[in-house]
Amino acid sequence: MTAVDERRTPWRIHGMSVEGYRHRRQGRPCQDACAHTVTESVAVLAVADGAGSRPRSEEGSRLAVELATEHFARRAAAAPDRRDGKAVRELLRDAFHDVREVFLDRTGPDAADFATTLTVVVLARGWLGHLSLGDGFVVLRAGTEDGERQFHLLPQPAAASEYSNETVFLTSPDAARWVHTDCVSDQGVDGVLLSTDGLAQAALNRSAGGALSPNTSFAEAVFRSLDVPGPVTASAHDGLGTLLRSDRLTALNADDKTLLRAVLKARP
Amino acid sequence: MHSDHPPTLPAEYADIEFENNAQRLPLVLCLDISSSMAGQPIQTLNNALAEWTRELHDDVSLSYSVEVAVVTFGGQGVAAWRGPQLLAPGAPVSPFVPAHMFRPPQLAAAGVTLMTEALELSMNIVAARKAELRASGLQYYRPQICLVTDGLPTDATGHLTDSWHRLIPVLADEQGARRFRLYAIGVGGITDRGEQVLRSFAPKFNARLQGFPFRELLQMMSASANAEQKGAGDEVFEKIFSQFKTQRPAWES
């Protein structure tokens, strides 16, 4: 499996991680990371959030997304036409197992210092696979109702604790138990957005009962700016950075922020 | 708000609508305003509260996340304040105010030291606030309660009492279950016995400080709030606290 020219994938993919207000004030690096890769048959997108309390978590999040794009793409390329949900979820778990094994091997006895969450989406022909460990989240754009584009939050793993800043990491001993997987085989999906929890308050709304749903105005705006045909311009790139660093988003959450998005290029 | 961040959204994102659903961090200041605090100490406390409020307003990340409630024990017995406003006992109003809207009360020193009852009220308002936040679907960090006193617990007639013993198992359970972090700080001329009481309330986070360093104390609470937002481990809180105890600035951590 080798990565191919992005012009050959039906998806336009763009995103970034930016340091949050607190890290900026303390002169600390961004502990979020994101990466993507495209092959002949699939595109893989990954985001990770290094644990704020761990000394080398910025390396951990980078290593996690790098390994995830490589291993998920390899597993998926070997079975691109798999459509059965159960088989896809197995494939995702196998790829996760590969990633975790290499991650623990590379980080050695100090693995816990590299603690990070991981959220991965595999875009294949006819199916979309989603695997998440920790508090990252994924929003899909699919379908239209009364002329309005519809957005869907994929189910997330169960919360690990009463407090929102506590979660499960790739290095947690029982990580595999907390992994959540999904297979979506809706041909109408034409937009995918992955994020770490730094954007949870901006990108998601909560009902009184605590149920989460996409903030439609946020999803619309971040997909719309990537729907513009052709390569992503420098000014579009800077615009997203300015959004992610804005006071408006910082007031909601001062953590690092990551937004990785993909839209289907207009069909000819 | 002061920050290095762009205050406005780029034009292409200007139509995004945000709900105010920042994760909340309830913070209770449980303050001794009994008669022994009269004079310079209460003035120092009022000044420190005013200055801390300005700093909170200027902190982009804390100002929308921290929610401040003030509980006092002294002249009015045990009382909860919603910002500058003294709440009637049992008033169906939450004493918590978002930090960006918080204004400090003007405190006057008088009366007795109903420390046990004040801590019980603090725990009750934290539990009630958590329930409210859950009911409105808002997430929260582990709350912080900061007890500050220069004396020993008394009853309503001003006589020393052992009623505080009833709190010890309750506080141990609550802290063990990570329902909140309790800081118990002795100031002024607090005695050895007073210090023992604080140690039994908050075995990890207790201190006996010279004078009335309320500024540093409130800055330490902000530093802890920051650490909480960051998801820091217990060792970070202990480090912040030990630096504070040696009266080095908390923000050095």
Image: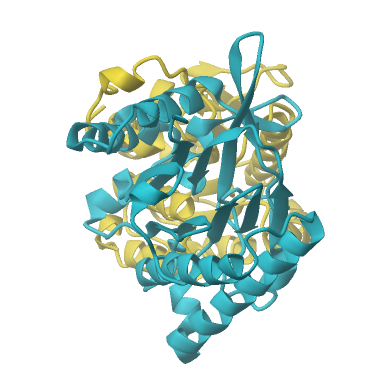
B248 sits to left or right of B193: left
Chain ID, yellow in image = B
In this view, A98 is above or below A26: below
What is the quadrant of the C terminus of chain A in the image?
A: top left
In this view, A101 is above or below A5: below
Q: Residue at x 49, y 91 (%)?
A: A109
Residue A119's image quarter?
A: bottom right
Most distant residue in the top direction: A146
Q: Residue at x 49, y 80 (%)?
A: A103
Q: x, y (%) of residue A85?
A: 78, 55
Q: Nearer the viewer, residue A97 or B168?
A: A97
Confirm whether residue A154 shows in the render: yes
Q: Residue at x 47, y 65 (%)?
A: A69
A58 sits to left or right of B33: left
Residue A63's image quarter?
A: bottom left
Confirm whether residue B78 shows in the render: no
Q: x, y (%) of residue B235?
A: 47, 71
Most distant residue in the front direction: A268
Residue A230's image quarter?
A: top left
Q: Residue at x 55, y 52 (%)?
A: A165
Q: x, y (%) of residue B224?
A: 43, 53
Most distant residue in the bottom direction: A109
Q: Nearer the viewer, residue B244 or B191?
A: B244
A158 sits to left or right of B11: right
Q: Nearer the viewer, residue A191 or A180?
A: A191
B17 sits to left or right of B51: right
Chain ID, cyan in image = A
